């Protein structure tokens, strides 16, 4: 088993279509006998520096588990590169399967809970 963590930065104008992006890549991974162990939508976030004159991007975190990695990661990279709405992507192999909620999503959830109380 190999584990990977993927972060996608999607053009902010495509925020309404995030579910389409997720479905496309989820289906591809499942077709390749892989599974998604963690999927987090971090929402629109401010960029550290402008990318293609954009100040914000929509972030998605995906952790996947692959039994057979024969060219699957290479194909994913090609899909990310050819998708004009993916501004940047990051793929990293990890030693273990990460299933806990990330600190970014924890903070986002806490802020939403505070806003509901007010």
Image (spheres, rainbow, N blue to C red):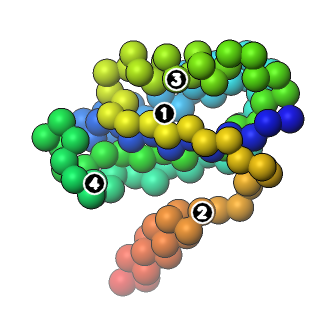
Q: Count residues near mark 1 (Cα–Cα under 10 Å), then give few for <14, some for 14-19, many for 20+.
A: few
The answer to whether residue 40 of the structure is visible from this angle is yes
User: N-terminal of the two: label 1 or label 2?
Assistant: 1
SS at badge 2: loop
Q: Which residue is mark 3?
A: 77
Q: Quadrant of the C terminus?
A: bottom left
Q: Count residues near mark 4 (Cα–Cα under 10 Å), then give few for <14, some for 14-19, many for 20+.
A: few
Marks 3 & 4, CB-CB < 8 Å contact: no
Farthest residue toward the bottom? 118
Q: Please give the label number shown on residue 30.
A: none
49 lies left or right of 76: left
User: N-terminal of the two: label 3 or label 4?
Assistant: 4
- Position in image of residue 92 (x %, y %): 61, 42
Marks 1 & 2, CB-CB < 8 Å contact: no
Q: Residue at x 37, y 30 (%)?
A: 86
Q: Residue at x 71, y 47 (%)?
A: 94
> Disc 1 versus disc 2: distance between alpha carbons?
20 Å
Q: Which residue is mark 2?
A: 102
71 lies left or right of 90: right
**Of labels 2 and 4, the one closer to you:** 4
Q: Residue at x 74, y 55 (%)?
A: 99
């Amino acid at each position: 088993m190999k584990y990977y963590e993927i972060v996608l930065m999607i053009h902010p104008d495509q925020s309404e279509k995030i579910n389409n992006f997720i479905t496309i890549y989820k289906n591809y991974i499942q077709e390749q006998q892989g599974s998604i162990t963690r999927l987090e939508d971090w929402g629109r976030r401010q960029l550290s520096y402008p990318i293609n004159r954009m100040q914000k991007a929509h972030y998605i975190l995906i952790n996947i588990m692959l039994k057979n990695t024969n060219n699957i990661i290479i194909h994913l990279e090609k899909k990310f590169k050819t998708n004009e709405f993916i501004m940047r992507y990051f793929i990293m192999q990890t030693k273990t399967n990460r299933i806990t909620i990330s600190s970014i999503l924890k903070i986002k959830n806490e802020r939403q809970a505070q806003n509901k109380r007010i």
